[in-house]
Image (spheres, rainbow, N blue to C red):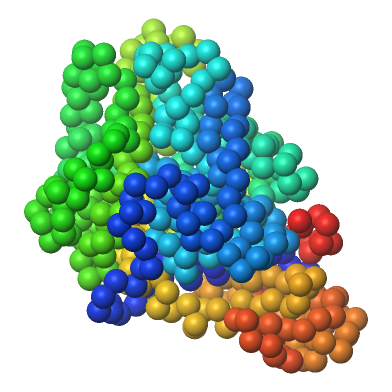
């Protein structure tokens, strides 16, 4: 029997289609000024605030959506969602109900946990260090991956009594997720699957002139910041929304093109001006100068490795060698699914293919079928809903106690269509096979539901996947 995979829901969220007139987002300008818990509560979803302590003393803010707006009670595995660089967990809810991935998954019974890494507006506390001190900001991507992500994984599993969780990362969220699994391989056993949206592990073929220029000048820029006693970069501040609204009233403005298109990849027809203004009320949300330097090293060197102190003695003190250690991707044994766009100015698609070749347990790779799909489209594209009816018919629910798997929509080999008839009559088992391999096993009566429409016949899109885990009882999924 197959596990509950969220891959199709991720595709629903990220796919695009022909642009429509007007704004498809049911959001308001005031959303730019709301904190994430206020935002979630405003749209009728339950929300919980949690604080996670890391081994090195940071106190991280985490928000949970424990049910859907329609009163859906979580019956499926928890999902840990990790945001992009300079951002926060607002990535997962800012475009509103019916569009944002956090809400889509909550409405479908998943237990949503949205993490915030050290240094952003929701994670600016420490047991001993004050936020204004240099010591507080002495972290790079290494510490986020080694301390923050494992702490959040353990916290979620302890609170939910689950053995494993799904991990969804976007951009920086993909980096720190893989750092966690390479530096602490035991955490692979706690992951059902990693859903990697625009995986930013290799960024050396970066087509953005601005990104390459900043990376080239990173050391000088960092020295300038620290000279004036600042170790934080792009923090969130009061009046941020008003400032960006004045600076960037429309995506057509030159400064907006520099801020968004040059960095992300131009896709003007799919970028909603109102939504952009609201998003800029939430991001930037804060980062460290050292984190910026680490990103610059990834861009300049094209190597997925730990932070380079640019000093032999410092590297020896930190790593026992002048040579900076690389992260060994062969240690990532958890199943990984990747999603990327061809017009992404942060994550060139060739870099994604390199990453995929180095992952030992790549389950699927998905190129969004839109030549203009860029980096920001993963969280701001205005036609995320357009293809949902086409995809939702491939997601099957069978009653409140009937759990069944979704599957990848990858074209080509490895797929099979199986029709399971008269599920409600309590058949002991229905088995779909292909090439003598068992792909699917059902052993639960109930009323079959496809896209919220009752049906006596379930249409399932299946993939022959050796990494699919057994179905478990309701109590273990709760």
Percent position (x, y) of residue 386?
40, 78
Q: Residue at the left extreme?
A: 254
Look at 31% across and 20% down and name the residue there: 231
Look at 82% across and 87% down and name the residue there: 424
Can the viewer see residue 454 in this picture?
A: yes
Which quadrant, please, contains the C terminus? bottom right
Which quadrant, please, contains the N terminus? bottom right
Residue 152 versus residue 461 in the image, above or below: above
Q: Is residue 354 left or right of residue 301?
A: right
The mark total stands at: 0
Q: Is residue 251 left or right of residue 429?
A: left
Look at 51% across and 20% down and name the residue there: 126
Q: Is residue 263 left or right of residue 419?
A: left
Look at 47% across and 49% down and name the residue there: 38
Residue 70 position by quadrant: bottom right
Percent position (x, y) of residue 90?
43, 49
Residue 350 position by quadrant: bottom left
Name the foreground residue: 124 vs 161. 124
Name the foreground residue: 172 vs 255. 255
Q: Residue at the right extreme?
A: 428
Q: Is residue 371 left or right of residue 166?
A: left
Residue 154 versus residue 171 in the image, above or below: above
Percent position (x, y) of residue 72?
66, 65
Residue 140 versus residue 366 in the image, above or below: above
Can the viewer see residue 171 in this picture?
A: no
Name the foreground residue: 289 vs 61. 61
Name the foreground residue: 403 vs 434. 403
Residue 211 position by quadrant: top left
Percent position (x, y) of residue 174?
47, 46
């Amino acid at each position: 029997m197959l596990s509950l995979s969220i891959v199709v829901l991720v595709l629903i969220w990220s796919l695009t289609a022909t642009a429509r007139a007007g704004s498809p987002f049911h959001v308001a300008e005031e959303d730019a000024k709301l904190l994430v818990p206020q935002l979630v509560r405003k749209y009728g979803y339950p929300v919980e605030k949690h604080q996670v302590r890391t081994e090195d003393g940071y106190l991280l803010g985490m928000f949970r959506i424990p049910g859907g707006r329609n009163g859906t009670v979580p019956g499926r595995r928890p999902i840990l969602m990790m945001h992009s660089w300079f951002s926060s967990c607002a990535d997962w809810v800012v475009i509103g109900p019916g569009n944002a991935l956090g809400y889509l998954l909550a409405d479908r019974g998943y237990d949503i946990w949205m993490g915030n890494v050290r240094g952003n507006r929701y994670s600016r506390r420490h047991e001993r260090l004050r936020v204004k001190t240099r010591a507080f900001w002495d972290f790079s991507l290494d510490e986020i991956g080694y301390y923050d992500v494992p702490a959040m994984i353990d916290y979620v599993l302890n609170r939910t009594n689950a053995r494993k969780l799904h991990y969804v990362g976007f951009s920086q969220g993909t980096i720190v997720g893989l750092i966690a699994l390479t530096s602490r391989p035991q955490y692979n056993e706690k992951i059902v699957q990693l859903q990697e949206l625009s995986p930013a592990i290799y960024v050396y073929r970066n087509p953005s002139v601005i990104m390459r220029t900043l990376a080239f000048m990173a050391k000088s820029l960092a020295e300038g910041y620290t000279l004036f006693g600042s170790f934080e970069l792009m923090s969130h501040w009061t009046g941020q929304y008003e400032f960006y609204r004045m600076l960037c009233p429309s995506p057509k403005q030159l400064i907006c093109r520099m801020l968004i298109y040059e960095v992300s990849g131009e896709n003007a027809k799919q970028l909603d001006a109102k939504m952009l203004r609201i998003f800029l009320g939430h991001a930037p949300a804060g980062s460290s100068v050292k984190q910026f330097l680490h990103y610059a090293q990834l861009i300049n060197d094209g190597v997925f490795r730990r932070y380079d102190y640019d000093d032999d003695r410092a590297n020896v003190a930190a790593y026992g060698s002048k040579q900076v250690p690389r992260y060994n991707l062969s240690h990532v044994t958890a199943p990984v699914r990747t999603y990327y766009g061809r017009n992404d100015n942060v994550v060139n698609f060739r870099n994604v293919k390199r990453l995929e070749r180095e992952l030992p347990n790549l389950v699927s790779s998905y190129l969004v079928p839109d030549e203009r799909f860029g980096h920001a489209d993963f969280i701001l594209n205005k036609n995320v809903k357009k293809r949902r009816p086409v995809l939702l018919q491939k997601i099957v629910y069978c009653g409140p106690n009937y759990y069944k798997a979704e599957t990848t929509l990858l074209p080509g080999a490895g797929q099979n269509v199986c029709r399971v008839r008269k599920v409600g009559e309590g058949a002991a088992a229905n088995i779909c096979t292909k090439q003598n391999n068992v792909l699917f096993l059902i052993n639960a009566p109930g009323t079959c539901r496809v896209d919220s429409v009752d049906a006596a016949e379930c249409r399932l899109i299946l993939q022959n996947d050796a990494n699919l885990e057994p179905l478990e009882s309701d109590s273990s999924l709760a």
